[in-house]
Structures are given as C-alpha cells and as structure tokens.
Amino acid sequence: MQSLPIHWNQFLSYFHFSRERIKREREKMLKAILTFLIFNLAISPTRSNTHFIHKSCNTTLYPELCYLYLSPFSTRIGTSPRLLAQTALAATLSTTRKTLKTLRTYTKTHKMTKRELGAMKDCLEEIDDSAYELHLSMVEMGKVRSGPNFLYNMNSIETWVSAALTDDDTCIDGFSERGMNGEVKTMVRKHVSTISHLASIALAFVNKYANG
C-alpha cells in the first residue's frame, strides 16, 4: 500500500490535534461554568427563596439531601423551575466527578482482591459514563428555549439523566456479591448512593420543568 504524501500526514496530524484541542477547550469551559454555579453563587438566601427550595425538595424522594445541596443557591434559583433543574444538574455533575476521583484514588491506595478490583473497574466505567451523560444534559439544558423544540430538548435531557441514574445503580449492584470486603462495599455505596440520589432529584426537577 502506497504511503500518504508528507503533506497529507501533516494535515491528518493537525486535524487530530485540532479535535483534541476543541475537546479540551469544551471541558475547560464546562468546568468554569460549574465552578461559577457551585462556588460563586452561594449568596445569602431570602426567606421566600428558601421556602421555594424547601417546598420543591419535599416533592423528591430525598428531601433532606436535596435541601442540603440546593439551599446554598436559593438566591440564584429564586422561584424558577428552570434554574432549579439546571442547578440540580450542575450539583449532580460536580459531585459525580468528585466521586469518580475519590474512587480512583481509593483503588490506587488500598489493596483489593481480584473480584473487588474487577467490580471497581466496572464501577469506574459506569460512573465515567454517568458523568458524560450529565455533561450532555447540562449542554442541552443551556440550549432549551420555549418553542417547537422545547419538548424534544427536554426529552433528551430526561433520557441522559435517566441513563446516568442507571449507571450509578449498576455500579452499586456490582458490589452486592458475597465475599467482598465490607469496607470496600460501604465506601462505594456511600459515595455512589449520594450521586444516585442527586441524579434522582435532578431528574424530578427536569421532569417538573418539562411538564410545566
């Protein structure tokens, strides 16, 4: 097979580099947005705003966790169902990424059996997928506008958040076998249950916003 001319090799190399650069820039931008949402908007809440958060959280399966994570952003959220859903997604994605980092660190610093390592490897893949799906939902949420595409956009978001929730639960199920270290099971369930519950909360608010 005849090799490609040098200039074509250079072009393909540049094209690959450009794609990687675009991907890195998108990740940097999303991280900046998340940092802004999670850390810079925790302004002193008003009574009416905290009441809205409290009332909304009481409609979820995990009201206490919901209020714990979202009440610091009650001023930003106000009484907006859209901002409530958006902030819940941001909190879920941020916590999922932290959990992924925690699990990776644990794997490197603790001895585990072959079965436990296999379950952890599968779990890390599931949580990585979950983070990506939540990332897609955040990007899509930024595009949502009232109009003919509203329900299509919201259905896409609901699908991705549901998939993230399934991935989280699949990770936990992987540690249900007997004979695994109790400490490993407890650690994984503690962290992954939190992001699973947050995904459930976010999905509830996404559904509520979609249904008006």
Image (cartoon, helix red, strand yellow):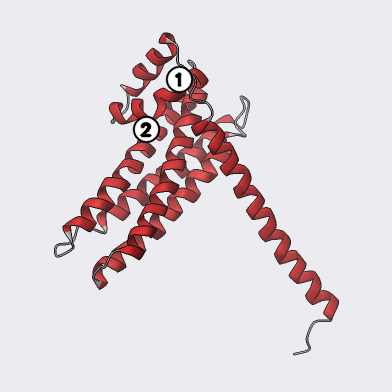
- Can you identify the residue that label 1 sits on? 74
Identify whether 166 is placed above or below 104.
Answer: above
Residue 71 in the figure: left or right of residue 140: left
Residue 128 in the figure: left or right of residue 115: right
Identify whether 181 is placed above or below 61.
Answer: below
Q: Looking at the image, which residue is at 32% across and 62% down?
A: 120
The one nearer the camera, 137 or 159, is: 137
User: Residue lying farthest front?
Assistant: 109
User: Residue lying farthest left?
Assistant: 178
- Can you identify the residue that label 2 sits on? 201
Dot 1 falls on a residue whose secondary structure is helix
Horizontal and vertical percent position of residue 51: 38, 13
Pointers 2 and 1 in contact (CB under 8 A)? no
Identify whether 174 is placed above or below 148.
Answer: below
Which amino acid does the dot numbered 2 rest on? Ile
Horizontal and vertical percent position of residue 184: 23, 58
Q: Looking at the image, which residue is at 39% across and 56% down?
A: 126
